[in-house]
């Protein structure tokens, strides 16, 4: 049996099963109870220090006035 046929049989059977189990584990990990606070905190990172709109770099600054 050549290498290609051996690897193809392995990929068609055991690797498919392994990848399905891995995918299921990742989905369960992402949607586990208690993880929503972590993901909400991560999702809000861009808005943490947004107290005011960003200044336009093309407009004159306060120091130049």
Image (spheres, rainbow, N blue to C red):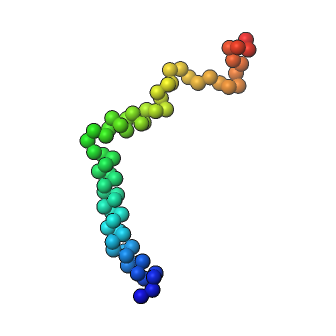
Image check: 65 left or right of 32? Answer: right
Q: Locate the C terminus and report the quarter of the image it occupies.
A: top right
Question: Which residue is the extreme one toward the right?
Answer: 64
**Total of numbered circles in the picture?**
0
Name the residue located 34 percent from the left edge and 58 percent from the top edge. 23
Q: Is residue 45 above or below residue 60?
A: below
Q: Is residue 53 above or below residue 3?
A: above
Quarter of image, res 11: bottom left
Residue 32 placed where, x, y %? 28, 45
Q: Is residue 22 above or below residue 5?
A: above
Name the residue located 38 percent from the left edge and 79 percent from the top edge. 9
Q: Is residue 51 above or below residue 18?
A: above
Q: Locate the N terminus and report the quarter of the image it occupies.
A: bottom left
52 or 13, which is in the foreground? 13
Quarter of image, res 59: top right
Residue 63 placed where, x, y %? 70, 14
Image check: 7 left or right of 37? Answer: right
Residue 47 placed where, x, y %? 47, 29
Question: Which residue is the extreme one toward the left?
Answer: 33
Name the residue located 45 percent from the left edge and 82 percent from the top edge. 3
Residue 5 placed where, x, y %? 42, 82
Question: Which residue is the extreme one toward the top?
Answer: 65
Name the residue located 50 percent from the left edge and 24 percent from the top edge. 50
């Amino acid at each position: 049996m050549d290498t290609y046929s051996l690897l193809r049989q392995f990929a068609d059977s055991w690797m498919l099963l392994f990848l399905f189990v891995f995918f299921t584990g990742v989905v369960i990990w992402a949607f586990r109870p208690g993880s929503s606070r972590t993901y909400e905190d991560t999702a809000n990172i861009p808005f943490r220090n947004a107290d005011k709109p960003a200044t336009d770099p093309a407009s004159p600054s306060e120091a130049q006035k």
